[in-house]
Image (cartoon, grey):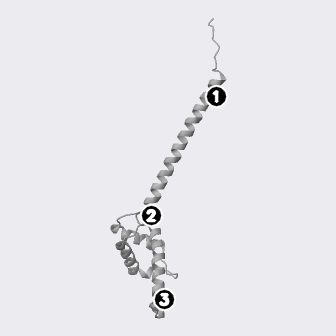
């Protein structure tokens, strides 16, 4: 008959110490992952900002002018037209995020407002 030695458990103090070490390791790993995720999101959001050069804006407006029959009743273009415009101006890209249909739509909102004001003043004969 073989004698079995009873299994010995470490003292409770050792288990508590091990648990604290593991809890510290887990906290460090989670903190590092959150930090990396935040840096990645920050980097991607900065690269997506649109920076319009004069040439891009000019080509965008010329494209919309050439496709003016696609303008809606509100004076805005559908997203499909803006997506096509984004593809049209892609060769002129120099910096900032690559232009998307949504970025083009935002640009048109600003440009069309200026054109509206200039056109309104021209219609009224105002030169101020």
Q: Residue at x 59, y 35 (%)?
A: 23
Is 45 drawn above or below residue 61 in the view shown? above
The residue to which callout 1 is attached is 16
The picture quadrant where one finds residue 22 is top right
Image quarter hosting the N terminus: top right
Q: Quick one: 59 or 115, which is closer to the camera?
A: 115
Tell me, yes or no, if residue 126 can be seen here.
Answer: yes
Q: Estimate the spatial distance between the alpha carbons at disc 1 and disc 2, rounded to whole Å.
A: 50 Å
- SS for tag 2? loop
In the picture of the structure, the residue carrying the numbered disc 3 is: 120
Residue extending furthest front?
Answer: 128
Q: For the point 45% across and 73% down, which residue is it?
A: 107
Q: Are marks 3 and 2 in contact (CB under 8 Å)?
A: no
- C-alpha gap between disc 3 and disc 1: 77 Å
As drawn, the residue found furthest toward the right would be: 12
Which residue: 61% across, 31% down? 19
Would residue 85 appear left or right of 120 to someone viewing this image?
left
To which residue does mark 2 refer?
Answer: 49
Residue 78 locus on image (x, y percent):
48, 74
What residue occupies the far bottom of the structure in this picture?
125
Q: Quadrant of residue 95?
A: bottom left
Report crowding for label 3: few under 14, some 14 to 19, many 20 or more residues within 10 A (C-alpha).
few
Residue 71 seen anywhere in this rendered image of the structure? no
**Residue 21, located in which quarter of the rendered image?**
top right
Q: Are marks 1 and 2 in contact (CB under 8 Å)?
A: no
Counting from the top left corner in percent of width and height, residue 114 is at 46, 81
How crowded is the residue under tag 2: few (<14 C-alpha within 10 Å), some, or many (20+)? some
Give the mark nearest the N terminus, 3 or 1.
1
Residue 9 screen position, x and y as percent: 64, 20
């Amino acid at each position: 008959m073989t004698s079995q030695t009873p299994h010995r458990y470490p003292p409770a103090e050792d288990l508590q110490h091990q648990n604290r070490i593991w809890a510290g390791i887990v906290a460090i790993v989670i903190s590092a992952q959150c930090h990396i995720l935040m840096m990645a999101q920050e980097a991607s959001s900065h690269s997506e900002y649109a920076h319009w050069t004069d040439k891009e804006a000019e080509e965008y407006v010329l494209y919309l002018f050439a496709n003016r029959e696609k303008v809606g009743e509100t004076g805005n273009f559908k997203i499909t037209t803006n997506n096509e415009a984004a593809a049209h101006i892609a060769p002129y890209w120099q910096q900032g995020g690559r232009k998307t249909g949504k970025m083009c739509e935002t640009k048109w909102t600003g440009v069309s407002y200026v054109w509206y004001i200039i056109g309104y003043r021209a219609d009224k004969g105002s030169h101020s």
